[in-house]
Image (cartoon, rainbow, N blue to C red):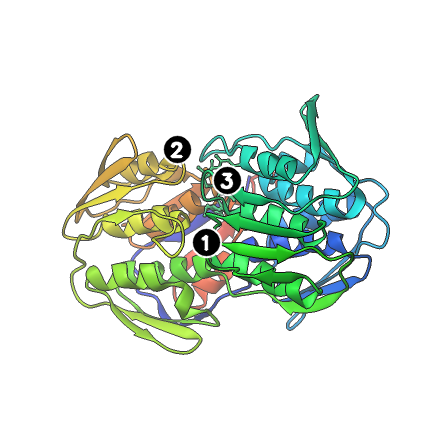
Amino acid sequence: MEKFVVRGGNPLLGTIKVSGAKNSALPCMAAAILTEDEVILENIPQVNDIETERKLLTSMGAEVELGYGRAQHRTRIKCAILSDPVAKYEIVKTMRASSLVLGPLIARTGIARVAMPGGCAIGGRPIDLHINGLEAMGATITQDHGYLEARADRLKGAHIVFDKITVTGTEDLLMAATLAEGESVFENCAREPEVTDLAALLIAMGAKIEGAGTGTIRIQGVSRLHGARHRINPDRIEAGTFLIAGAITGGDLNVDCCEPKHLGALITKLEQCGVKIDVGADHVRVRSGGELKAADVTTEEYPGFPTDMQAQYMALATQAEGTSTVIENIFENRFMHVQELIRMGANISISGRTATVRGKTPLQSAAVMCSDLRASASLVLAALVADGETILDRVYHLDRGYEHFEEKLRGVGAQIRRMGDVFGKK
Ligand code: EPZ
């Protein structure tokens, strides 16, 4: 398996560019199922989860073109005929966000078979809220042999209050409601920018949606949707990861092509840590403000501190003077990075959903193991300040959600390179 070799000690200096948001691109690609017309999405990140989504849509009969190149981070999708509305286990097991095709498939074709997404490293990841919502809209859903089968002649608008705030649950049902009969009102919705980005695409396709980005979304169902062209938001988690990379290395880094208004909770926290932040229209500059100070974090749904930034923040907290408590409220097992950080010399203890980080502790290089996308990013950040050369194994986790991660970091002074498997295997 491919590894990263990272030599710590270099402050990151210069400008680093942010790619399109994986977690916007995935629901927006699924939204193309809702029309037989062509949908074109710009600013698509070149990451493995997008390739997985391409395979998934193609396996159902869609035409999907993924063009990259310098200005071509674009995909063209045409779901004229969906000959096989099945999300097969071989694909779903590699990306649980495949459940995002459930709502669009049943809304467009009246039938959907989707392999139950297994859990993943960070938790059980159930989709009961997706299922309950579709049943409230009139779908009949059965489970057999690890698959969900959903059927409905035509979904009907419904009033749904989500038991818990769910990002892909909100997205899945939002897509289903666009073609349902009548009005839907959803309450306790996720307010993440990825939901708002998806709603912007759906409205461009002819959907009638009000309130996306707030806790209550109102949808008037229509009989069909048409094609559209849409530009995906910048990736706020990639941007946040780079901001922490600049802070932890004591550098002077300009994080470009981002959306600063999506980074409010993180920027506030970094300023509490004593980091200097200058916010521009589409970029954020981060500079060292001297010794880092400890600050507590509790992950919350947007606009609170993002769970997807918790692991990266913990790496920073190991370099701050004082004790930081990090509470993970969203997922039940999102401390996979802690043991690896401890192996590099961090002083962290866990009690339930609370990690207590005592800093500042010098980090030493070590051989470490990546376990999930954001835990892997946390280990890269730690390696950037560790003494010596850290070897990170199973970097395929990073390739799922960070485009050209090592090249971008090398471009601002990091000593990081990818090492193929000794036998040359990917
Ligand atoms: C999305 O996952 C993101 N993935 C995750 O990013 C992100 O961590 C998460 O939202 C929270 O922000 C994509 O958008 C593709 P949830 P999602 O449904 O939608 C529970 C990354 O690193 N829940 O908001 O799956 C669930 O177990 C990934 O890019 C139910 O109980 O998360 C969790 O505890 C990781 N039943 C909580 O709700 C359901 O039916 C929030 O999960 C659905 C969710």
Q: Which amino acid does label 1 sit on?
A: Gly
Q: Mark 3 or 2 closer to N-term? A: 2
Q: Mark 1 or 3 closer to N-term? A: 1
The Cα–Cα distance between marks 3 and 2, rounded to whole angstroms, is 23 Å
The numbered disc on residue 332 is: 2
User: Which of labels 3 and 2 is toward the front?
Assistant: 2
Determine if the C-beta at disc 1 is less than 8 A from ligand 1. no
Q: Where is residue 172 in the image (x, y as percent from the top left)?
A: 61, 46
Question: Can you see residue 97?
Answer: yes
Q: What residue type is labelled 2?
A: Glu
Front residue of 169 and 291: 169
Helix, strand or loop under label 1? loop
Helix, strand or loop under label 2? loop
**In contact (CB < 8 Å): disc 1 and disc 3:** no
Determine if the C-beta at disc 2 is less than 8 A from ligand 1. yes
Q: In this view, does 299 lie to the left or right of 152?
A: left
* Residue farthest toward the left in the current orientation of the protein: 322
The numbered disc on residue 215 is: 1
**Quadrant in which the N terminus appears:** top right
